[in-house]
Amino acid sequence: MLATHDTFTHPLAVERVRLAFGGLKALDGASFHVEPGIVTGLIGPNGAGKTTMFNVISGLYRANSGSIRFMDHSIERLSPHKITRLGLVRTFQIARGFPKLSVFEHLMVYGAQQPGEGIGTALAGSASARQREAELAEKALSIAARLRLSHVIDNKVTALSGGQKKLLEIGRALMAEPRMILFDEPAAGVNPTLAEEIGDHLLALVSEGMTVLLIEHDMALIERICKRVIVMAQGRTLAEGTFDDVRENREVQDAYLGGRR
């Protein structure tokens, strides 16, 4: 089971965020909030600013203006590792990792409160450090089993299939003991059966108290697992509501679905 955390009305609130690269407005005053304990979909056409928004929320980019609050903390000026320590973790479209490490070693690297993070603790090899190492090892094995990766636990990351790398990316995020995860196209490039399995994993996470914000182009997956959908276009928030609400929205049809047919 995942650890339970304090509940906020809006775990994540984005207000009037702007970011420009030279003369290009990547984000142009986008605002939205995410409700706790559900999967929220963030959709929009290519170039809408979705991944840029994830990069700003997670601290990889710094917005020119606007505010971002996570669990009542202002995070728009925090570094990525400080945001992660607050419990906000993101995944990437292309699974990242350490190619020379095994699946088990990869998961261990991303464990929260690593005993090796402090030089003194790492050198001393204290009993508390050894205990934490054992706890992380148990957690890594449990997450691998949850994601059906136990049979490749000793394989190098480079030996994994594309789908297994997607599952490992979920595992990497879970090792950080998050309160909320930003998933950037977790089902991209996988077969329909695995896409459905990934959707089931995300639903299981929210059933255990996690909050999920998901970028995805697979509209069948968005419709199945997202209770709420946010639509972006041209760096702005275009519409919010249920999947049916946004599907029937004329502005969304024009900007994202190509207009009425």
Image: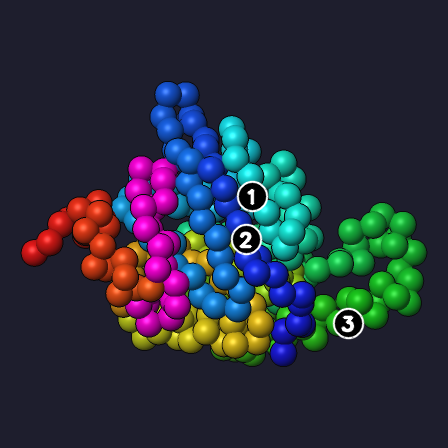
Camera-side residue of 2 and 189: 2
Magenta highlight on residue 115 = no
Whether label 2 touches label 1, CB < 8 Å: yes
Q: How many marks?
A: 3
Residue labelled with disc 2: 12
Q: Are marks 3 and 2 in contact (CB under 8 Å)?
A: no
Q: On the rendered structure, is 7 left or right of 130?
A: left
- Secondary structure state at the residue bearing disc 2: strand
Query: In which image quadrant can residue 112 be found?
Result: bottom right
The image quadrant that residue 26 belongs to is: top left
Q: Are marks 3 and 1 in contact (CB under 8 Å)?
A: no
**In this orientation, which residue lies closer to the viewer: 228 or 170?**
228
Residue count near mark 1 (Cα–Cα under 10 Å), binned few <14, some 14–19, many ≥20: many
- Image mark for residue 184: none
User: In this figure, which residue is indicated by the disc labeled 3?
Assistant: 134
Query: In x, y percent, where is residue 116?
Result: 79, 55
Q: CA distance from mark 3 to mark 1?
A: 36 Å
**Magenta span covers which residues?**
221-241
Q: Earlier in the sequence, mark 3 or mark 2?
A: 2
Query: Percent position (x, y) of residue 167?
Result: 47, 66
Residue at image mark 1: 68
